[in-house]
Image (tube, helix red, strand yellow):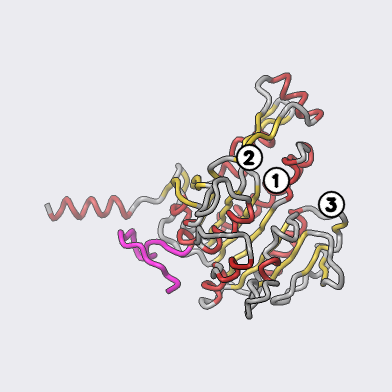
């Protein structure tokens, strides 16, 4: 019996793959790149997969783990994306979408005490969807985005600091920078341009860091029924995500995470000719109701934590908790305590 137990343990310790891909279990992520994309659902990947009578595999399909989260909280069913995203970064279900939410401790406040730097790139969100809204809550003595670097892809507000991807991107704590290429509803730069420019400089600040890309522009294009714009935005995000995945393949301490909020059901064309017309003219698809679940994709360190179905608020603890790096242990611990 003793030898049988030994061989059983040995067999478990040698598990090095997940979803038929090479994977090391229990690795602590010291570099986290987290995409929060409003409106996205896995079936919408067909916008990129089926093109010009051909088929290609997207970077979203290269993930080690896929999960689903429930899109509700203590107050509402089918909550808006900004509520979901806040629930994910605080681990709380009691999001009210008011200044009361500023009392909820975000993930970067836990990480900063352990040497992590946090950068946030916001894309397309309005003033209510932006985390900057919580930054200005009058009753809070400490700004919500304290000890973070923030860049906003939106038309600059009056007297705001600005950045441009072809210039040296500024790195200044607790001061939001707006993309000077943005005017009205559009930006001259794209998401990939800004991500590459910002992250290449941000990552040099610390070996331990969290970088969040919050996108609302894709959902806004869907809501307008502008599928050409939605496809272009999704393509930019997909290429950006591919860049992040390449980092995880080169170093085992990267966690690459994509979570969604306010996922929408899109009724796609059913036949090849209809799809051809849809590709050519951007018509023939319809955005339907909000879904009750959101999508989660994960690769790299601790990706195994994100398989399954769970509440949006559980994203928080699945980033922070996992088995010790020394081996596959049953006890789940929080390495940041």
Mark 3 burial class by Cα count in 10 Å: few <14, some 14-19, many 20+:
some
Query: Is disc 2 in contact with disc 3, using a CB cutoff of under 8 Å?
Result: no
Which residue is depicted at the point 82% across and 72% down? Answer: 161
Q: Residue furthest bottom?
A: 141
Looking at the picture, how far across and down is residue 52, in whole percent? 74, 28
Q: Residue furthest left?
A: 1
Q: CA distance from mark 1 to mark 3?
A: 14 Å
Indicate whether 73 appears above or below 283.
below
Q: Give the magenta part as a residue range.
A: 320-337
Q: First in sequence: mark 1 or mark 2?
A: 1
Residue underneath mark 3: 186
Looking at the picture, how far across and down is residue 67, in whole percent? 49, 46
Mark 2 burial class by Cα count in 10 Å: few <14, some 14-19, many 20+:
many
Query: Is disc 1 in contact with disc 2, using a CB cutoff of under 8 Å?
Result: yes
Mark 1 burial class by Cα count in 10 Å: few <14, some 14-19, many 20+:
many
Looking at the picture, how far across and down is residue 290, in whole percent? 61, 40
Q: First in sequence: mark 2 or mark 3?
A: 3
Looking at the picture, how far across and down is residue 90, in whole percent? 53, 64
Q: Nearer the viewer, residue 54 or 76?
A: 76
Residue 177 falls in image quadrant: bottom right
Secondary structure of the residue carrying tag 1 is: helix
Residue underneath mark 2: 264
Q: CA distance from mark 1 to mark 2?
A: 8 Å
Which residue is depicted at the point 70% across and 72% down? Answer: 136
Which residue is depicted at the point 63% across and 51% down? Answer: 81
Secondary structure of the residue carrying tag 3 is: strand
Q: First in sequence: mark 1 or mark 3?
A: 3
Secondary structure of the residue carrying tag 2 is: strand
Residue underneath mark 1: 219
């Amino acid at each position: 019996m003793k030898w049988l137990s030994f061989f059983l343990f040995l067999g478990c310790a040698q598990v090095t793959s997940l979803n038929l891909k090479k994977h090391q279990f229990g690795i602590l992520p010291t570099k986290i790149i987290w995409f929060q994309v409003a409106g996205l659902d896995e079936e919408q990947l067909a916008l990129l997969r089926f093109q010009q009578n051909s088929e290609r595999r997207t970077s979203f399909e290269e993930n080690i783990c896929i999960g689903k989260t429930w899109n509700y909280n203590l107050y509402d069913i089918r909550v808006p994306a900004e509520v979901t995203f806040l629930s994910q970064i605080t681990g709380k279900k009691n999001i009210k979408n008011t200044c009361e939410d500023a009392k909820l401790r975000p993930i970067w406040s836990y990480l900063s005490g352990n040497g992590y730097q946090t950068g946030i790139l916001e894309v397309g969100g309005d003033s209510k969807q932006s985390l900057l809204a919580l930054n200005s809550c009058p009753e809070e003595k400490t700004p919500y985005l304290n000890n973070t670097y923030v860049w906003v892809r939106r038309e600059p507000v009056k007297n705001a600091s600005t950045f441009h991807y072809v210039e040296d991107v500024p790195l200044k704590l607790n001061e939001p920078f707006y993309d000077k290429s943005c005017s009205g509803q559009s930006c001259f730069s794209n998401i990939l341009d800004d991500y590459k420019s910002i992250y290449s400089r941000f990552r040099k600040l610390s070996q331990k860091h969290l970088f969040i890309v919050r996108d609302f522009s894709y959902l806004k294009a869907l809501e307008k029924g502008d599928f050409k714009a939605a496809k272009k935005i999704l393509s930019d995000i997909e290429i950006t995500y591919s860049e992040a995945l390449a980092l995880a393949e080169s170093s085992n301490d990267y966690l690459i995470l994509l979570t969604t909020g306010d996922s929408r059901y899109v009724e796609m064309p059913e036949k090849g000719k209809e799809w051809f017309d849809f590709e050519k003219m951007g018509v023939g698809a319809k955005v339907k109701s909000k879904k009750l679940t959101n999508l989660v994709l994960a690769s790299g360190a601790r990706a195994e934590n994100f398989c399954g179905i769970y509440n949006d608020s559980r994203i928080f603890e699945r980033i922070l908790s996992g088995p010790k790096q020394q081996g596959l242990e049953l006890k789940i611990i929080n390495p940041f305590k």
